[in-house]
Amino acid sequence: MTKNTVPLSTVKKGNRCLIKKLFSNGKKRNRLLDLGIVKGGEIEVLYSSPFGSPVAYYVQGAVIALRREDTDEIFVEIL
């Protein structure tokens, strides 16, 4: 990973990112892959709930919500 790679949980609203690495394992990893969170994919931060989690993301034509504990394990490069 490069120094430009950050956890998805730290990316601000409105930014688009390129997914670089997924550190989840087991069922959580499979769920994220099924949602379209794959290496090389693009993801955009749309908006967050009043308390900051979950956050809505635009991934492969769909809007999905992810908890902070999940996005801490997804590393991206901001475009």
Image: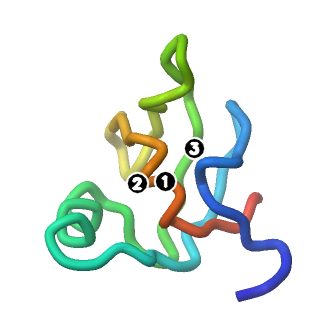
Badge 1 marks a residue whose secondary structure is helix
In the picture, measured across the screen, residue 42 lies left or right of residue 17, that is: left
Q: Give the label on residue 44, or none.
A: 3
Mark 2, residue position: 70
Q: CA distance from mark 1 to mark 3?
A: 13 Å
The residue positioned 45% from the left and 75% from the top of the image is 22
x and y percent of residue 2 in the render? 79, 85
Crowding near the residue tagged with mark 1, few <14, some 14–19, many ≥20 C-alpha atoms within 10 Å: many
Residue 67, quarter of picture = top left
- Residue lying furthest right: 3
Q: CA distance from mark 3 to mark 2?
A: 15 Å
Name the image quarter holding the N terminus: bottom right
Crowding near the residue tagged with mark 2, few <14, some 14–19, many ≥20 C-alpha atoms within 10 Å: some
Q: Give the label on residue 71, or none.
A: 1
x and y percent of residue 26 in the render? 18, 77
Please determine whether, in this image, residue 50 is positioned above or below residue 27: above
Badge 2 marks a residue whose secondary structure is helix
The residue positioned 53% from the left and 23% from the top of the image is 48
Mark 1 or 3, nearer chain start: 3
In the picture, measured across the screen, residue 11 lies left or right of residue 49, that is: right
Q: Amino acid at mark 1?
A: Thr
In the picture, measured across the screen, residue 10 lies left or right of residue 33, that is: right
Answer whether labels 1 and 2 touch (C-beta < 8 Å).
Answer: yes
